Image (cartoon, rainbow, N blue to C red):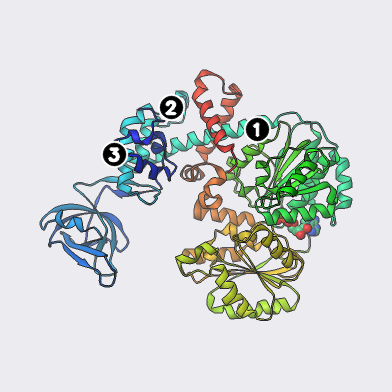
């Protein structure tokens, strides 16, 4: 069967089931075969009922030693529970199922079963909702789930798919590569990915698939890179730099100065620039990017600046206007009146205005530039590679590209994601900053905390209070932002001006709140993480983060970066009542350092790159990438093979590379449309 056959061509999958699978992004048989399990259960060996500790997941060979009993759970409506006892030579386990009354007729005293599940010793010794098998099932895959599916259903579908199509999946890797790196052929790798016979073959399979993904990914980046080698008219970067520095209200740090020099060189070189400015929160990336924009408009070209949020776009707009004057800058936001937008675009397409600022929707908008020469993205880690591809697709060849990222990236991941970019690093903070003091506290001390906030406000400072989003209300225990605003923040700061900011506000309302906070008309701002990135109010000195356990360290570090932007002492309080050891350890770690690199590295090691970036950030399935992080040899091998391949066949035109080329193109196209 061809891998692009629809899922309905598999036995047991009708249109409705296919639709459900579509929610997981699975449409063809090939999609299904490449759908990586998120975990596995090892049911190769029999465990003993009397010995397995609480929480242990395993397979038990039991003889059923009672009649099944079906009971209603009092006060819980239609909920019922079926129990039956089982035993082996070492002891007993009670098997219980909720709402599966049909099992009553299938189970009989004296029957032998393999029961697989997690041991619960909190009330007797139980297996809750175990799965029964006639024989040991081996290692079983656990897939990401969606409503209306079950693991066993997915497993059956994958089995059917493997049988029907695994031999027909196209082998992208040339045989010489398979041999050189001892990589499994694709059909075997897919079979082992889903149903490995042992852990070694699973590792082998994942390495093979990771290698392939990485190779493709590198080839895709390279094909983006090919565009950037395009010629671009040289600019007088150094002259522009001299004037720019006279406009800038402060003296640049050494690091900023160096980065501007690197950019200046790029702009003079006659080739399109493709550069990343990487620097911790507060290191002053914006000014460096503004220089690049200035050099371009001085040379008669146009520059576009994209930010991940409207708040940030407005902030940039204001700063650009302050530097270059209102005639040269246009703001473009989704929520703007059509007439205002049309006018802005008219001025951009006639060349009257030199700079466009907006969210990434900017690229999707109708207008045309007169002569777009530079695209800058702020907080690039929010956008991901696909956006970068889209930018390069949109820009004509020869457009300079500059991206800024505050999230310092551990080296291996950096190589992977930004391997095609030149990098300028801002490893220095502007002078006079004192590191933010970070403390973990529990909710019990909230009153003390607020007394402290009150005293800071007395000194004329401002404070942020971050708490989870509105959508989080139903899942309990969380301080939803509105309730928090009314019942806590306003109650505990009765005489203060407290503002509220969240994602559900209209863009105009958001802008107004932000404006009030910036202008000092608010003492405190209760907000969701919409203020996580980029917001710059130097007078704010305290950041309080409620339910801190809910965020990754990198996000917390970003939030913390909203304070400590002036010379005054600044504080960050992580409020959490979560006592789990892992959580406490993570939060304590953040208290111990203000070094963004250390934070990123720790986040990566403890939570994996999936959480670190969110899968859309890199465009690779997290499983594969996660494997690679622990396998730098494969990472480097794939990297050098991609380079060798391109050296021999830069456009992948040889027939031996046709499949690879098609796959790269597909990846590129997928990355292309903005989403
Ligand atoms: P980030 O790198 O996080 O984007 P910003 O560019 O927003 O940081 O800069 C943080 C703050 O530091 C801003 O208020 C900015 O005006 C200020 N700043 C940047 N560079 C300098 C400098 N060399 N001297 C003094 N202040 C600076
Ligand atoms: Mg910034």
- Sort mark 2 into few (<14), some (14-19) or many (20+) by Cα contacts within 10 Å: some
Q: Earlier in the sequence, mark 2 or mark 1?
A: 2
Q: In the rendering, which numbered label is found on residue 12?
A: 3
Residue drawn 51% across and 45% down? 629
Residue drawn 32% across and 31% down? 164
Q: Is mark 2 within 8 Å of ligand 2?
A: no
Q: Quadrant of ligand 1?
A: bottom right
Q: Is mark 1 within 8 Å of ligand 2?
A: no
Q: Are discs 2 and 3 less than 8 Å apart at CB?
A: no
| Residue pointed to by mark 1 | 225
**Mark 2 falls on what kind of element?**
loop
Instruction: Using the rendered image of the protein, determine whether residue 439 is visible from the camera's viewpoint.
Output: yes
Q: Quick one: quadrant of the C terminus?
A: top right
| Residue pointed to by mark 2 | 171
From the viewer's perspective, is the residue at label 2 or at label 3 nearer?
3
Residue 167, percent across and down? 35, 28
């Amino acid at each position: 069967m061809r891998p692009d056959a629809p899922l309905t061509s598999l036995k047991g999958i009708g249109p409705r089931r296919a639709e459900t699978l579509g929610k997981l992004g699975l449409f063809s048989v090939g999609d299904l075969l490449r759908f990586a399990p998120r975990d596995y259960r090892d049911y190769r060996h029999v465990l003993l009922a009397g010995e397995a500790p609480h929480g242990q997941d395993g397979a038990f060979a039991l003889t059923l030693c009672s009649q099944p009993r079906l009971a209603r759970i009092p006060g819980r409506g239609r909920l019922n529970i079926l129990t039956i006892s089982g035993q082996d030579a070492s002891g007993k386990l009670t098997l219980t199922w909720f709402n599966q009354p049909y099992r009553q007729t299938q189970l009989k005293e004296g029957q032998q079963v393999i029961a697989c599940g997690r041991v619960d010793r909190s009330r007797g010794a139980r297996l809750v909702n175990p799965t029964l098998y006639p024989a040991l099932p081996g290692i079983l895959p656990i897939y990401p789930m969606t409503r209306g599916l079950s693991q066993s259903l997915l497993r059956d579908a994958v089995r059917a798919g493997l049988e029907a199509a695994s031999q027909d999946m196209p082998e992208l890797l040339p045989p010489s590569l398979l041999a050189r790196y001892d990589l499994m052929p694709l059909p075997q790798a897919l079979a082992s990915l889903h149903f490995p016979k042992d852990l070694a073959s699973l590792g082998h399979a994942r390495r093979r698939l990771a290698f392939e993904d990485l190779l493709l990914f590198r080839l895709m980046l390279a094909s983006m890179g090919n565009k950037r080698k395009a010629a671009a008219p040289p600019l007088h970067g150094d002259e522009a730099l001299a004037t720019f520095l006279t406009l800038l209200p402060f003296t640049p740090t050494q690091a900023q100065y160096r980065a501007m020099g690197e950019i200046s060189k790029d702009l003079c070189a006659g080739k399109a620039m493709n550069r990343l400015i990487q620097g911790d929160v507060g290191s002053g990336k914006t000014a460096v990017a503004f220089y690049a924009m200035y050099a371009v408009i001085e040379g008669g070209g146009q520059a576009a600046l994209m930010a991940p949020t409207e708040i940030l776009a407005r902030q940039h707009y204001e700063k650009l206007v302050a530097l270059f004057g209102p005639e040269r800058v246009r703001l473009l936001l989704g929520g703007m009146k059509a007439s205002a937008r049309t006018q802005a675009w008219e001025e951009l397409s006639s060349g009257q205005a030199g700079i466009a600022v907006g969210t990434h929707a900017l690229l999707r908008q109708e207008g045309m530039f007169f002569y777009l020469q530079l695209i800058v993205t702020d907080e690039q880690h929010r956008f991901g590679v696909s956006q970068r591809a889209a930018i390069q697709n949109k820009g004509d060849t020869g457009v300079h590209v500059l991206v800024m990222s505050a999230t310092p990236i551990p080296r291996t991941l950096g190589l992977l994601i930004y391997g095609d970019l030149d990098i300028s690093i801002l490893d220095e903070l502007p002078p006079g900053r004192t590191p933010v003091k970070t403390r973990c506290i529990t909710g019990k001390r909230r009153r003390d905390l607020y007394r402290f906030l009150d005293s800071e406000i007395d000194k004329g400072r401002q404070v942020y209070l971050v708490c989870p989003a509105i959508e989080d209300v139903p899942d309990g225990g969380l301080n939803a932002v509105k309730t928090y605003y009314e019942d806590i923040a306003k109650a505990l700061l009765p005489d203060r001006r407290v503002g509220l900011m969240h994602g559900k506000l209209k863009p105009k309302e958001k802008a107004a709140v932000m404006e009030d906070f910036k202008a000092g008309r608010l003492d405190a701002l209760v907000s969701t993480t919409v203020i996580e990135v980029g917001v710059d109010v130097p007078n704010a000195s305290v950041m309080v983060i409620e339910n801190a356990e809910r965020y990754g360290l990198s996000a917390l570090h970003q939030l913390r970066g909203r304070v400590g932007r002036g010379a005054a002492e600044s504080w960050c309080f992580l409020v959490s009542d979560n006592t789990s050891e892992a959580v406490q350890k993570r939060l304590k770690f953040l208290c111990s350092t203000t070094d963004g690199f250390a934070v990123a590295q720790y986040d990566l090691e403890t939570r994996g790159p999936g959480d670190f970036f969110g899968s859309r950030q890199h465009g690779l399935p997290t499983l594969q990438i996660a494997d690679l992080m622990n396998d730098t040899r494969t990472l480097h091998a794939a990297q050098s093979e991609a380079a060798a391949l391109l050296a021999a066949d830069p456009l992948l035109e040889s027939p031996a590379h046709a499949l690879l080329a098609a796959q790269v193109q597909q990846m590129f196209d997928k990355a292309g449309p903005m989403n």
